């Protein structure tokens, strides 16, 4: 079963947990603490709510598992958005143009690093995991180095700047969770 098929299966189950006037807004998948977690977001005119389901489509109430999944999903989203300066296809096009017009030393290495980063990024839906986050970070750093960034990593700076927002998201999940977290 593909990730998309699995998300569809979980979404069907999660939709049954929607209260009157509420609908399933999305499903994020994370692998943490050795388990797959499907974090489901619900929206209504009055509020939003969260519910995490396991691979067996049963609701999860383990606080640490649910919050780690929310944090990891958010970090992977930010990593993807920040990779390659936030617009990798545009960067790749600019590198190709630069190779054609000026052909500076190191352009092939930069293009190869950009292509490797593009290959690392997974289409949604995808499974957020520590390994995926590390792979995106490593590929981003290789690209930065190929582009001449040696001291400060813009990708690392972007990731560090979002920790407060990630903490706010996990607090929101905890506050608005449909069940009691243990």
Image (cartoon, rainbow, N blue to C red):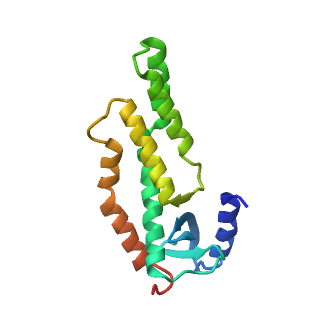
Residue lying farthest to the top in this orientation: 101
Picture residue at 39% right of the left edge, 67% below the top:
169
Dividing the picture into quarters, in which one does residue 110 lie?
top left
Viewer-proximal residue among 34 and 68 = 34
Residue 15: x %, y % from top left? 64, 74
Viewer-proximal residue among 17 and 130 = 130
In this rendering, would 17 be left or right of 102?
A: right
In this rendering, would 159 be left or right of 81?
A: left
Residue 45: x %, y % from top left? 49, 71
Picture residue at 48% right of the left edge, 49% below the top:
135
Picture residue at 49% right of the left edge, 22% below the top:
96
Residue 63: x %, y % from top left? 44, 80
Residue 23: x %, y % from top left? 58, 71
Dividing the picture into quarters, in which one does residue 53 lie?
bottom right
Quadrant where the N terminus sits is bottom right
Quadrant where the C terminus sits is bottom left
Residue 48 at least partly seen: no
Viewer-proximal residue among 38 and 22 = 38
Residue lying farthest to the left in this orientation: 151
């Amino acid at each position: 079963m593909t990730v998309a098929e699995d998300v569809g299966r979980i979404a069907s189950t999660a939709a049954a947990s929607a209260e009157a006037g509420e609908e399933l807004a999305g499903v994020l998948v994370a692998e943490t603490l050795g388990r797959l977690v499907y974090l489901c977001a619900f929206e209504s005119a009055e509020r939003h709510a969260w519910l995490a389901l396991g691979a067996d489509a049963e609701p999860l109430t383990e606080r640490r598992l649910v919050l780690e999944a929310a944090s990891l999903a958010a970090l992977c989203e930010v990593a993807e958005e920040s990779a390659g300066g936030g617009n990798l296809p545009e960067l790749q096009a600019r590198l190709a143009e630069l190779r054609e017009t000026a052909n500076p030393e190191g352009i092939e290495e930069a293009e190869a690093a950009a292509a490797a980063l593009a290959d690392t990024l997974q289409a949604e839906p995808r499974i957020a995991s520590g390994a995926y986050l590390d792979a995106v970070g490593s590929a981003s750093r290789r690209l930065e180095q190929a582009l001449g960034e040696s001291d400060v990593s813009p990708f690392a700076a972007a990731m560090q700047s979002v920790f407060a927002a990630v903490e706010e998201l996990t607090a929101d999940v905890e506050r608005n969770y449909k069940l009691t977290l243990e």
